[in-house]
Image (spheres, rainbow, N blue to C red):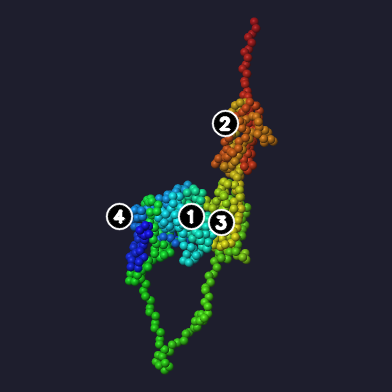
Amino acid sequence: MAAQFGRRLCKGAATTAVAAVAVAALSASQAPGVNDHGRQAAADATPSPEASASDRSATGNSPYYTDLPPLKSPNPSPSTGPGPGGTSPTESGIPATVLDAYKKAESALRDAKPGCNLPWQLLAAIGRVESGQARGGQVRADGTTIKPILGPQLDGNGFALIKDTDDGAYDGNSSYDQAVGPMQFIPSTWAWASRDGNGDGKQDPNNIYDAALAAGHYLCRNNWDLSQQGDLDRAILSYNNSREYLNLVMRWLEYYRKGAHEVPDGTGTLPGNRSDDGAGAGPAPTTPGTTIPGHSTPKPGPKPEKPEKPTKPGGGATAPKPPTSPPATPPGTPSTPPTTPPTPTDTVHHLEDAGTAKLTAMAGHAFDRRISTRAETVAGKAVAKVRVRFTIVGDTDTTFTGGESVATVATNSSGVAVAPALRAGEKTGSVTIRATVVGRAVPGLDYKATVTERAADALARTGEAALACAPGGKFADPIEVKATYKGAVADGVAATATLVKSPDDPAANDKGPYFKDADGKPVRTLTGLKTDAKGLLKLPELYADDTAGTFLLRITTAGGATLTVELTVAAVAETSSPSPSASPSA
């Protein structure tokens, strides 16, 4: 196994000191400092409020591989031995399908969230630390791992305590959650962060395309700009809230930025050390008589005093003194385990609406109201410092500001959590936003929001020229109107234009001016029209039949705006030439 998957750190007692010195030297050589762009060191970062407010992090702070990237000399020497499948075991090689998934995710995020500036090398760094690039590229052609990749169950025994949230659907464990797949998402995070990265209609955490795209969106939430070191630190900490994790991912990120290449699937190297086995996390163990550079050897404490020997009465020695106080617990008394005081989350009994008004917005516009939820005890007392998760459910393109469908907010001193502002999508109808308590199984609280179609309340012509033509002719200028709503530009508003019979009869006329359809046939009603980004609507050319007279064109929009335009069809007046004067009679 070691030959197949690459280097593993020797754990024998005889080599512990040597390995410790090597790791210490490597850490010192690659410790994050100010990089070549002058950015702040990752080692100086601390977990941010945004990171700690995340739903236990993407991975639930699960264990990860702690192997550091190798030192790179200016002229690296050739490999001393073949790697899996006869390829070089160099750490910069990334399995082909895995590398393709990272690059496709970067491309998708460049279009979806250009302000995030997500580099694929960050996904590669996290994928290396989380799963060793899907166990060295053990994936099928569609990107699905050959075998599931599962972290240990998060039962609180050395790890976070996260009870089952998916009934074992993803991790096969109906008691506790486990991190799943090559990017190690816990089921509760995958439930809202999941994406379909390979276009097969499924969202599978065991598929590297799906998982890489989900990781990209996860790292790009909260309007983070990953070209800024502060936001980059926050994003990485939100994935696994550990300073050691942040430092390690930053090292791999810089390593892959210096160069990476594609290797065949299944031939990548597999890390040998994990944060839960003590092999690569924290100070390395030492053997007696050795000292690791930079670490001091603790001095032995004072030796315990020997007890005084009792003597017979009358002797010179002092008799032993009786104890000054009785034992803390009388013999035979059963010990009472210490009780842990309940957290604020433990005291939450239910959620209440905190005065949220009616939520209505026009498609493409922001809601002017925000959702407010209060966490309360069974007695109705407000509970502060509780994380409330707001989730937009159902088939809708309405999102929170920043394009996310999930937001987590801590309650304030009044027990109230205020969700980020909502922005309506283009799909109209009812939208459900569900508030739940993170880490507490209490019924959720649903809010209804309504998205209405884009509307205008006023229409006006952009020109003032009279609209006239001769029978059988064509009107000289197309008609253009501008739509507004409450004085602002009304863009994307649906409109209809009809040549009506009269001011009181909105039915389409059967004579007079007309438009032409795609086949050149006369039509007197146009539907499916929309105003442009400036609220302008320019109608097609108008023609006239042989009927003279005055006609009406009525334009209506969603929202009730109406404009009636008068059209005149009349023959051009002919001017008669003067007759020659009669010649004088003889």
Q: Is residue 39 visible?
A: no
| Residue plotted at (48% across, 67% down) | 157
Q: Which residue is mark 2?
A: 519
Q: Is residue 284 visible?
A: yes
Depicted 451 relative to depicted 322: above or below = above
Dot 2 amino acid type: Asp
Inter-mark Cα distance, 1 to 2: 52 Å
Q: Residue at horizontal 52%, vertical 63%? A: 175
Residue 167: x and y in percent read 54, 59
Residue at disc 2, secondary structure = loop
Residue with the mark numbered 3: 390
Three-letter amino acid code at the position of disc 3 = Phe
Residue 48 vs residue 392: left or right? left
**Image quadrant containing the N terminus:** bottom left
For marks 4 and 3, give the CA distance. 54 Å
Q: Earlier in the sequence, mark 4 or mark 1?
A: 4
Q: Mark 3 vs mark 1: which is more N-terminal?
A: 1
Give the CA separation, mark 4 to mark 1.
38 Å
Which tag, 3 or 2, sits closer to the chain's start?
3
Of marks 4 and 1, the one in the foreground: 1
Query: Disc 3 to disc 1, how far (Cα)?
Result: 22 Å
Pointers 1 and 2 in contact (CB under 8 A)? no
Q: Amino acid at mark 1?
A: Pro
Q: Which mark is residue 399?
A: none
* Count of numbered circles in the view: 4
Q: Please rate how many residues cluster around mark 1, counting C-alpha atoms within 10 Å: few if below 14, some from 14 to 19, many from 20.
A: many
Front position among marks 3 and 2 = 2
Q: Give the residue number, with chain letter if any, for mark 4.
A: 77
Which residue lies under the disc numbered 1? 205
Q: Could you tell me which secondary element the residue under label 1 belongs to?
A: loop
Mark 4 vs mark 2, CA separation in Å: 73 Å
**Mark 3 or 1, which is nearer the eye?**
1
